[in-house]
Image (cartoon, grey):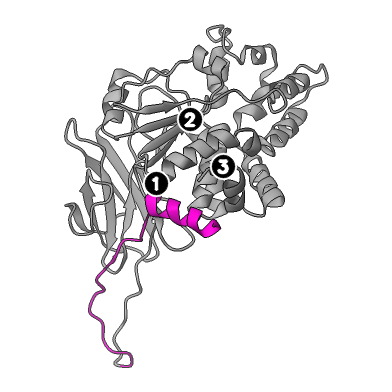
């Protein structure tokens, strides 16, 4: 039973490692000739900013000046050797590719002369608005495969997406959006999706017993509140978030397993409820825990949540569900704006203590099949 769940997700969202490039000719051992080591491409990254056609690639290799070939295609799964070659024999560890005007999203293979090719694209989508919209593809799994690009996206609130953003998003083919926000959040910042036909899924608000807002308020409005107390409270909330939002996560997993792809899921900041959902999904796919935690922590590098909060102090967000936070000193609410590894570690530890494993939890609480 556990194996079937993992296999279903791996089949839908995982891709086998790219075939290695052919090794250079080498002599038989003992004839005194030098045998070149396999070239390992690591730390591959692509960055593209909103409104700019440039894709900035960077990577590292285990051998200095190791030449690579770079192929590009609009197909995220294009086979090795069938992309357009944009660089060959390149010994640098960076390259800038300028896409033609109006071109769809581009995907790249970095191919060493001898070693496995690495498939990469921009993780953070180049959007003018919205918040924290990024691709979960490209992460390596424990069994040597990697998560497919372009099938699962995580995001924060989408209210601020522009027409240009939707022009870009429409090319991604997203078919399902799971919005984890409560009804008041959705009313305050509604999603006006214009990126193609989708199934837009919302969920009932947590029950009174599971609603964490009252415990949050009791800590935050305490005259003796400190940043340390807020951080402890936030970590405590992470220990139960997986149970509070299990019905929503189950709906997300059902859509993934049924092949309703590409799929995007979001909350408000795109870091807490969404962060737990991403951690569950990546864990189910066999992504190492260290990488799962790194993806979670990436949110505060993508978005300066504290800066956004301080902008809200001007009064423009006083009608939001979080307006009471504006009454507090910034240093007190700062822990709420972070994506500390300790937060998601609290969730993962709690799941393993309560259920034995992430997969077991998904089977028991977040999987309807």
User: Is 149 situated left or right of 362 in this image?
Assistant: left
SS type, badge 3: loop
Q: Secondary structure at mark 1?
A: loop
* Residue under the point 51% across and 35% down: 299
Q: Quadrant of residue 345?
A: top right
Q: Which residue is mark 3?
A: 366
* 306 in the magenta segment: no
Q: Are marks 3 and 2 in contact (CB under 8 Å)?
A: no
Q: Position of residue 236 (x, y in %)?
A: 73, 35
Q: Nearer the viewer, mark 3 or mark 2?
A: 3
Horizontal and vertical percent for residue 145?
A: 40, 59
Nearer to me, 34 or 110: 110
Q: CA distance from mark 1 to mark 2?
A: 16 Å
Stretch in magenta? 1-30
* Disc number placed over residue 137 in the picture, else none: 1
CA gap, disc 3 and disc 2: 17 Å
- Seen at 32% across and 36% down, the residue is 48
| Residue drawn at the location 72% of the way across and 26% of the way down | 209
User: Can you identify the residue that label 2 sits on?
Assistant: 266
Q: Closest to the observer: 305 or 202?
A: 202
Which of the two labelled residues, at mark 1 and mark 2, occupies the earlier sequence position? Answer: 1
Is 58 or 91 nearer to us in this picture? 58
Q: Residues within 10 Å of mark 3 (few under 14, many from 20)?
A: many
Whether label 1 touches label 2, CB < 8 Å: no
Which numbered dot is residue 79? none
Closer to the N terminus: mark 3 or mark 2?
2
């Amino acid at each position: 039973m556990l194996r079937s769940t993992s296999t279903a997700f791996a089949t839908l969202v995982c891709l086998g490692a790219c075939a290695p490039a052919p090794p250079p000719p080498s002599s038989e051992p003992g004839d005194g000739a030098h045998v070149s080591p396999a070239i390992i491409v690591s730390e591959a990254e692509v960055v593209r900013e909103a409104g700019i056609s440039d894709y900035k690639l960077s990577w590292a290799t285990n051998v200095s000046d190791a030449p690579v070939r770079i192929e590009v295609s609009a197909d995220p799964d294009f086979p090795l050797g069938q992309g357009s070659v944009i660089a060959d024999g390149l010994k640098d560890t960076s390259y800038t590719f300028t896409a033609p005007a109006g071109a769809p999203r581009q995907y790249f293979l970095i191919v060493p002369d001898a070693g496995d090719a690495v498939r990469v694209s921009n993780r953070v989508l180049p959007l003018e608005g919205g918040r924290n919209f990024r691709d979960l593809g490209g992460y390596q799994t424990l069994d040597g495969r990697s998560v497919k690009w372009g099938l699962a996206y995580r995001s924060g609130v989408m209210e601020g997406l522009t027409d240009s953003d939707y022009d870009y998003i429409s090319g991604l083919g997203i078919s399902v959006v799971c919005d984890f926000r409560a009804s008041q959040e959705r009313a305050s910042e509604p999603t006006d999706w214009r990126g193609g036909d989708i199934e837009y899924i919302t969920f009932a608000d947590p029950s009174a017993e599971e609603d964490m807002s009252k415990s949050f308020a009791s800590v935050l409005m305490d005259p003796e509140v400190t940043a340390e107390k807020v951080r402890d409270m936030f970590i405590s909330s992470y220990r139960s978030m997986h149970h509070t939002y299990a019905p929503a996560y189950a709906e997300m997993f059902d859509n993934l397993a049924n092949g309703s792809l590409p799929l995007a899921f979001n909350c408000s900041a795109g870091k807490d409820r969404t962060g737990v959902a991403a951690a569950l999904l990546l864990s189910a796919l066999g992504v190492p825990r260290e990488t799962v935690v790194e993806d979670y922590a990436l949110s505060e590098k993508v978005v300066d949540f504290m800066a956004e909060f301080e902008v809200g102090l001007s009064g423009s967000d006083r009608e939001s569900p979080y307006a009471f936070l504006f009454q507090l000193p910034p240093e007190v609410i700062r822990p709420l704006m972070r994506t500390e590894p300790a937060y998601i570690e609290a969730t993962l530890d709690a799941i393993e203590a309560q259920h034995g494993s992430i997969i077991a939890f998904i089977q028991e609480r977040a999987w309807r099949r």
